[in-house]
Image: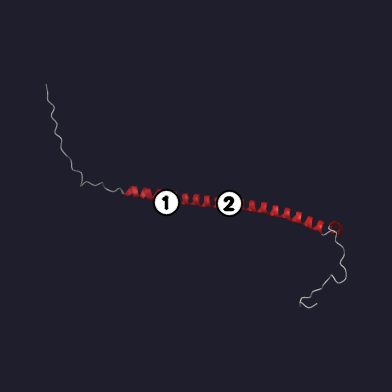
Amino acid sequence: MSAIYAEFKRVENARVSRERDGRRGKELLALLAAVLPVAVALLAYTGLHLQTVQVGYEIDRDRRTVAKLQEERQKLLLRLAADTNPEHTAEFARGANLVPAKPGQIFYVSKSGKP
C-alpha cells in the first residue's frame, strides 16, 4: 500500500495587488462617450413629449370650459331677450297687479344729490 502525503501551506496574499489595465479604462470611457449623448437625447425627448401631452390636456380642458361658457352665455342672452321683451314685461306687471306710476310718485335724483 502506498501512502499519500500532502503538505498544506498557508499563503499570504495580503500584499498582492492587481495591476491596472489601461485599456479597460479607455474602453469604458469610449463606451460612456457613445452612450451618454444618446441617453441625454432620449431623456430630453421624453421630457418634451411629456410637456406636449400635458399642454394638450390643458388645451382640451380649456376648450371644454370655453364651450361650456359660450353655451351658458347663449342661454343668458336668450333669457335676457325674453325678460326684456315689452310684452313679457307687461304680462309680468299684470300678474303682479302693478299699475302705472301716478304723478308725485316719481322722484328724479341728479348726480349732485339735489332734486
Asked whether the beta carbons under mark 2 and mark 1 sit within 8 Å of each other, the answer is no
Report the residue at 36% width, 50% height from top.
26
C-alpha gap between disc 2 and disc 1? 32 Å
**Residue lying at 65% horizontally and 54% vertically, measured from the top left:** 62
Q: Residue at x 58, y 51 (%)?
A: 54
Vertical placement of residue 114 versus 52, above or below:
below
Q: Secondary structure at mark 2?
A: helix
Residue 48 left/right relative to 17: right
Q: Residues within 10 Å of mark 2 (few under 14, many from 20)?
A: few
The label number, if any, that marks residue 54 in the structure image: 2
Residue 73 at x, y percent in the picture: 74, 56
Please state the horizontal and vertical placement of residue 48, each as a whole percent of the image: 54, 52
Specify the amino acid type for callout 2. Answer: Gln
Instruction: Give 38 or 84, whichever is nearer the viewer.
Output: 84
- Identify the element where label 1 is drawn: helix
Which quadrant, please, contains the C terminus? bottom right
Give the residue furthest to the top.
1
Identify which residue is drawn at 52% across, 52% down: 47
Q: Is residue 40 left or right of residue 78?
A: left
Please state which of the two labelled residues, at mark 2 or mark 1, is closer to the viewer. Answer: 2
Amino acid under label 1?
Ala
| Residue 80, quarter of the rendered image | bottom right
- The residue under label 1 is 33
Q: Nearer the viewer, residue 9 or 57?
A: 57
